[in-house]
Amino acid sequence: MPSKEQGILKIFSVLLCVGVLLAGTSFAEDIHSSWQQMKGQYFVVYYRADVPEDFVQMTMDTSQEEFKRVTDNLGITNNEEWALEKQVKIYIYSDKDDFVKNGGQATWAHGVAFAQAKTIKLYPDPQGFFDTLLPHELGHIIFRDYIGYTASVPLWFEEGVAIYQEKAKRLGAKKQVKETIENGQFIPLSQLSGVRLYKNSKDQVVDLFYAESASAIYYMITELGEQEFYMLCRELKNNTPFTAALHKTYLRFKGIDELNQAWVDYLQG
Ligand SMILES: [Zn+2]
């Protein structure tokens, strides 16, 4: 029997997104063309006719609030060198079936962000739509808009940044990753950087990938320091390669292996 805690972890583990994995692919409007729309300052919400109006309004209001919170979290609120280039499009599908079939998404995904197209696709999922999914996807869009589309960043880093925007930040991830160190399933950051996720990726792989991404970024921001993290993001924005940006920001890390060791020490300590 799984414990209650494992049950909770499992719930979080299915609240996933494909995220910027799809950033480089061209965004295509889906074949189902009947969308209603609501326009705001930073957002345009497109929605199916069967999505309740108050749900749409709450999506708009929450997105505006989360925009402020996410830019604060990433240290870019008052950065005069950045302003959101154009409005973010949020598509709300009728349900999971509509999202998978007409939106062309993986069955294990609950939302997706196309960073360059500034587009988010979601459906009214009762599991944490406003607290988890929306902030996560906005995190992808804002982070990429800020650092630019030419910056080369490992997928685990992008996912970790997006997860950090979720209200609960998947705090169970630390315990989960610690257990993988003990049972030998842990993937070091150097190898995690080579992991890609696909529509047919196994749940176990997807689950571990997100847990490690969440834990590594949580460690970097809360233990290594917010200011240092902001500095790292600014280096990435200036197109400094990822490893060089790490070294410039955290002098004691020559590269990703030293960061990995420091994170593992923290998990075990
Ligand atoms: Zn994501």
Image: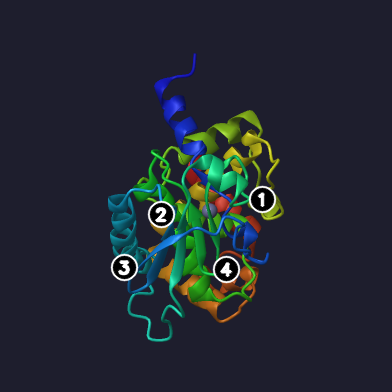
Looking at the image, which residue sits at the far bottom?
A: 80
The mark found on residue 177 in the picture is none
Q: Residue at x 49, y 31 (%)?
A: 10
Q: Secondary structure at mark 4?
A: helix
User: Residue flagged by tag 4: what amino acid is it?
Assistant: Leu
The residue indicated by pointer 3 is 68
Q: Residues within 10 Å of mark 3 (few under 14, many from 20)?
A: few
Give me the disc on residue 192.
Answer: 1
> For the residues marked 2 and 4, what is the alpha-carbon distance in whole angstroms?
29 Å
Query: Could you say where residue 211 lies in the image, as x and y percent from the top left?
Result: 53, 42
Q: CA distance from mark 3 to mark 1?
A: 31 Å
Q: Nearer the viewer, residue 163 or 44?
A: 44
What's the distance in space between the residues labelled 2 and 3, CA to CA? 13 Å
Which residue does the numbered mark 2 point to in the structure image? 134
Compared to residue 78, the image places residue 157 above or below, namely: above
* 195 and 28: which is toward the camera: 28
What's the residue type where badge 1 is placed?
Leu
Marked residue nearer the N-terminal end (3 or 1): 3
| Residue at the spot of label 4 | 246
x and y percent of residue 125 in the render?
Answer: 42, 41
* Vertical placement of residue 20 versus 125, above or below: below
Q: Which-is-in-front pick, marks 4 and 1? A: 1
